[in-house]
Amino acid sequence: MGRAWRLAAALSIIVVVPVTAGCSRYFGCAPGPPSDITVSDLAGVYTSSDGGKFELREDGHYDATNVPPDLVDRSAEGTWTLDVASETSEDLRLGDTQLWISGDRAEPWLYRFEGDPDRCDLVEFRRNR
């Protein structure tokens, strides 16, 4: 009986750990991007509540102002890429910085995690109108 219980416990860990890893999207605090979002949909100027701002251009370049040094690598400009096909990593990269996308094609917003993603502390960047 003890062996069967240990086997059941081991199998439950194998099943539960992948499901809970990165659970922030599964619990709704950080909803995923629209599957059909494009580079053109994301182009624009985004601002955070603390005044950080960056502009994503359709040509794959960005400019950043007043953003924390951990957001971009000491550069106020660089290249960005979109990759919403990956379920386990970021949706968008600003150079080496990971960002995620939410909202819809008409009103996308970007975010990054402040600390542990499972705590759902988000730094949001909303597109200016």
Image: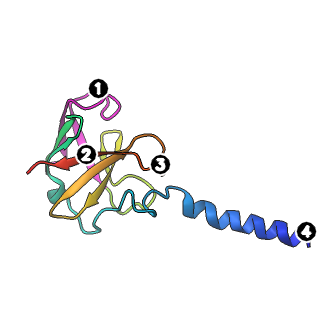
Q: Does dot 2 land on a helix, a strand or a loop? A: strand
What is the C-alpha distance between the residues marked 3 and 2?
26 Å
**Horizontal and vertical percent for residue 68?**
30, 30
Q: What residue type is labelled 3?
A: Arg
Residue at the spot of label 4? 2
**Horizontal and vertical percent for residue 40?**
14, 58
What is the C-alpha distance between the residues marked 3 and 4?
36 Å
**Horizontal and vertical percent for residue 38?**
20, 61
Q: Which of marks 3 and 2 is nearer the N terminus?
A: 2
Residue at the spot of label 2? 80
The label nearer to you, 1 versus 3, is: 3
Q: Name the disc covering residue 4, or none.
A: none
Q: Does dot 4 land on a helix, a strand or a loop? A: helix
Q: What residue type is labelled 1?
A: Arg
The label nearer to you, 3 versus 4, is: 3
Question: 10 Å neighbourhood of mark 3: few (<14), some, or many (≥20)?
Answer: few
Which contiguous range is marked in magenta?
58-82
Foreground residue, 25 or 29?
29
For this view, does 78 lie left or right of residue 90? left
Q: Earlier in the sequence, mark 2 or mark 1?
A: 1
Residue at the spot of label 3? 119
Q: Earlier in the sequence, mark 2 or mark 4?
A: 4
The label nearer to you, 2 versus 4, is: 4
Q: What is the residue that sits farthest to the right in this orientation?
A: 1
